[in-house]
Amino acid sequence: MILPGAVLGVLGGGQLGRMFTVRAREMGYRVIVLDPDHGSPAGAIADHHIAAQYDDAIALEEMATKCAAITTEFENVPADVLARLAERVPVRPGPEAVAIAQDRIAEKTYLLREGFPTTPFQVVRSPDELARAWDAVGSPALLKTARLGYDGKGQAPVTDRESLTDAFAQFRGASCVLERRLDLEAELSVVLARGVDGELACFPPIENVHVDGILYTSTVPARVTTALTDQARDLAMSLAARLEYVGVMAVEKFLNNSFAA
């Protein structure tokens, strides 16, 4: 048990990191934030802000030496950095889960392998794979970069081979996934927490509406049937258990005739 007065580390200094820092300090913990942005929101209120790159050896040594535990505020912190820290200090969520979440190819491949529902997709890593992917997925589709896509960024709708080729060129040859574009009834997310002992606490499903790729409204609880509520919660909890995830996680799903992760 890590009691108040201990130092907690956060990799990432954005708005979520700031919320974490506020609550941790209210509970009596001290917080060190590692973020390269000298003006980061979380760093501005932390007990100590290390303004350095996430893989900076001196910064990581300070974090490992001073922190009782370390977390990350977003999924794009390099997973190998978390793995290095995990050799010295508890890191939650673990680097293995973060490595899956930060790469769409790894994420979708994992979900498919473990039996979770997912939109039909194909991996595209080179121009030579475009035709095969198009034949397998069909139209309409979405081409998405494997990494660093958020708020609609790193995504392009495609309707034919020409638009697919143009979109892949636009992404400068980055590894991508091509996925079927579905007619969706709703987007749901489930926020849950899982402890080291495997105990799970799950919030009611949330119904989200996006405008131009950015979250616009969230309605809680989601306006769906009890059966769909139970299905959404069960899928999220099963995924957290399969990943052996420790920490807080949001699992997003789309509703059409069935859930697609």
Image (cartoon, rainbow, N blue to C red):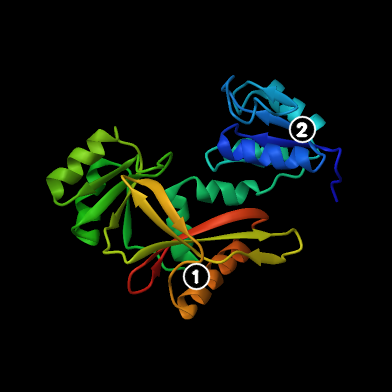
Residue 183, percent across and down? 26, 64
Pick whichever, 211 or 189, lies toward us. Answer: 211
Relative vertical location of residue 200 with respect to residue 157 in this rendering, above or below: below
Residue farthest to the bottom?
227
- Is 138 situated left or right of 62 in this image? left
Find the distance from the CA under tag 2 to the CA under tag 1. 37 Å
Q: Which mark is residue 64?
A: 2
- Is 99 situated left or right of 1 in this image? left
Structural crowding at the residue carrying mark 1, measured as other residues with C-alpha within 10 Å and reported as few (<14), some (14–19) or many (≥20)? many
Please tell me in which quadrant of the rendered image residue 250 appears.
bottom right
Relative vertical location of residue 79 with respect to residue 237 in this rendering, above or below: above
Pick whichever, 96 or 188, lies toward us. Answer: 188
The three-letter amino acid code for the residue at tag 1 is Ala
Residue 205, percent across and down? 51, 65
- Is 154 situated left or right of 201 in this image? left
Q: Secondary structure at mark 2?
A: helix
User: Visible in this render: residue 10?
Assistant: yes
Residue 244, percent across and down? 65, 60
Residue at 40% from the left image edge and 41% from the top image edge: 149
Please tell me in which quadrant of the rendered image residue 77 appears.
top right
Structural crowding at the residue carrying mark 2, measured as other residues with C-alpha within 10 Å and reported as few (<14), some (14–19) or many (≥20)? many
- Is 108 situated left or right of 159 in this image? right
The three-letter amino acid code for the residue at tag 2 is Ala
Relative vertical location of residue 43 with respect to residue 122 in this rendering, above or below: above
Residue identifier under label 1: 232
Please tell me in which quadrant of the rendered image residue 240 appears.
bottom right
Q: Secondary structure at mark 1?
A: helix
Contact, mark 2 vs mark 1 (Cβ under 8 Å): no
Q: Which mark is residue 198?
A: none
Question: Where is the C terminus found, in terms of image quarters?
Answer: bottom left
Nearest to N terminus: mark 2 or mark 1: 2
Relative vertical location of residue 228 with respect to residue 29 in this rendering, above or below: below
